[in-house]
Image (cartoon, grey):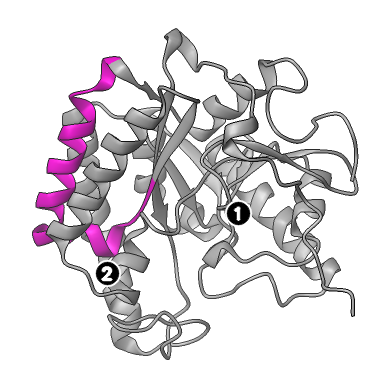
Amino acid sequence: MKLPMNDRYDYVSIKDRVPYDWPNGTRLAVCLSNNVEHFAFKAGMGLNDSAVSAPADYRSYAWRDYGNRIGIWRMFDVFDELDLPWSHNVNSMVMELYPDIVAKIVERGDEIIAHGRTNSERSDGLWEEDEARLIAETTEVITEYWGRRPSGWMGPYIAESAVTSDLLAEAGYKYTLQSPCDDQPIWLRTRSGPLLSIPYPLELNDVGVYVRRHHSAPVFGEMMIDQFDEMLRLADEQPLVYSVSLHTFLVGQPFRLKYLRAALEHIAARRDDVWLAKPEDVAAHVMSLPEGIVPGSRTAAG
């Protein structure tokens, strides 16, 4: 029996890699990610406070709608207060339905990362032609409303089909956030050439923390701080990417926002020791490095 294997990247131990620096001699890049999503009303994929795959009922819709009506605006206040750059994984339907949110993202100079059309669907069960169409439609709408073509992709539910990376490379994307296998950027093989993978968290992700594992807001705040402190220490040996993923309907709740603010204050206090970056900044820096520094190859096709 031949076991199916992932041929997108090779195994390279973190101990066997060439060291390099981020800008200004720093070794820890801090990428803070927020998810801005729209859902179908009582249709498609649902979510409740105990299950990601719950029915798409009225309560599920209203709970998540809280994020766009209330939560994100409280989060923006914290982001502005601490002067921290953010990236936002945005459904293309958000661009059409919530122009004031898009305007605020543009005003802040944050990055928009393509996040599919809506979080009521996932792409890993689609035929290749349909998935390619989904990527094209998402890209077209975001480009129209943002005025820039998105350079990164993070699909709803981090769903990855057998050809997603191929389709993203063919659509002109520079990087993906869908391979949470590393603390450093790595190059992925695709049938049309390389695609950069930038670290994105499954562990330091509020959906996993609150919905799946039912941890409290203080625990998530401690996780953010502990991860940051330990990665800053480990970064003495090699460059790393610290990332956190937030959802507006979860951490935008006041009792959770308190602990988010405290964790971000802790990070902001060390801003001179780290590189506060957006994923597009990380991608640009990696692409400026000589071939062979970052695991994988940026010149060879898969």
Residue ID at (59%, 20%): 285
Q: Which residues are magenta?
A: 244-272
In the picture of the structure, the residue carrying the numbered disc 1 is: 178
Q: Amino acid at mark 1?
A: Gln
**For residue 118, above or below residue 277:** below
SS label for mark 1? loop
Q: Which mark is residue 215?
A: none
Residue 130: name its quadrant: bottom right
The crowd level at tag 2 (other Cα within 10 Å; few <14, some 14-19, many 20+) is some
Res. 295 image quadrant = top right
What is the x, y in percent for residue 287?
Answer: 69, 22
Marked residue nearer the N-terminal end (1 or 2):
1
What is the CA distance from the residue labelled 1 to the residue labelled 2? 21 Å
Eyeballing the image, is 162 above or below 112? below
Q: Which residue is painted at 41% across and 16% down in the image? A: 26
Residue matched to label 2: 210
Q: Classify the position of the N terminus by image quarter.
A: bottom right
Q: Which amino acid is tagged 2?
A: Tyr
Rendered location of residue 72, percent (x, y): 27, 52
- The residue under the point 16% across, 31% down is 81
